[in-house]
Amino acid sequence: MPVVRYFFVGGTAAVVDLGIFFVFAKVLGFQYLWVAAIGFIIATLVNYILSIRHVFKSGIRFTRKQEMLYVYTISTLGLALNQAILFAMVEGLRVELMLSKLTANGCVFFWNYLARRHWVFTR
């Protein structure tokens, strides 16, 4: 099942994203929204590489360059959603930083999978 494989691929990318976020925002005190954006971009690359190896058939509908462009386009919307949730939780609701990041990542996971499956890769 692709969604189960994507869960593990997404989990690996999330570990990268959360690791970067923890070290640079939580431990070193860098501005959390900037760190979240950079970590998200790096994790998207990890997710793409693992996804084309383990989840989706690559190069069927589009060239690899086009696929990557579309994945990052979809991820830009995911990043906006991630940032909005993170900001609302940290600044508005005063939820702890890492819990806010985990919640935002969890919400965006479903967007990323469904959008990539529907618009980028074959089913």
Image: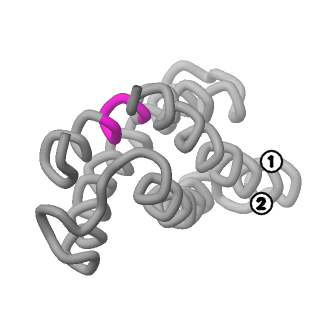
Helix, strand or loop under label 1: helix
What span is in magenta?
109-113
Say which amino acid is labelled 1: Lys
Query: Can you identify the residue that label 2 sits on?
Result: 24
Q: Is residue 110 magenta?
A: yes
Say which amino acid is labelled 2: Phe
In the displayed orientation, state which residue is furthest to the bottom. 65
Q: Which mark is residue 26?
A: 1
Q: Position of 63 compared to 12: left or right?
A: left
Among the 4 quarters of the image, the one containing residue 91: top right
**Above or below, 107 relative to 59:** above
Locate residue 29, reporting x and y percent.
Answer: 80, 57
Residue shown at 55%/61% (left/top)?
Answer: 46
Locate residue 114, reporting x and y percent.
Answer: 25, 34
- Quadrant of the frame with the C terminus: top left
- Quadrant of the frame with the N terminus: top left
In the displayed orientation, state which residue is furthest to the right. 27
Among the 4 quarters of the image, the one containing residue 85: top left
The answer to whether marks 1 and 2 mark residues whose Cβ atoms lie closer than 8 Å is: yes
Residue shown at 59%/36% (left/top)?
Answer: 8
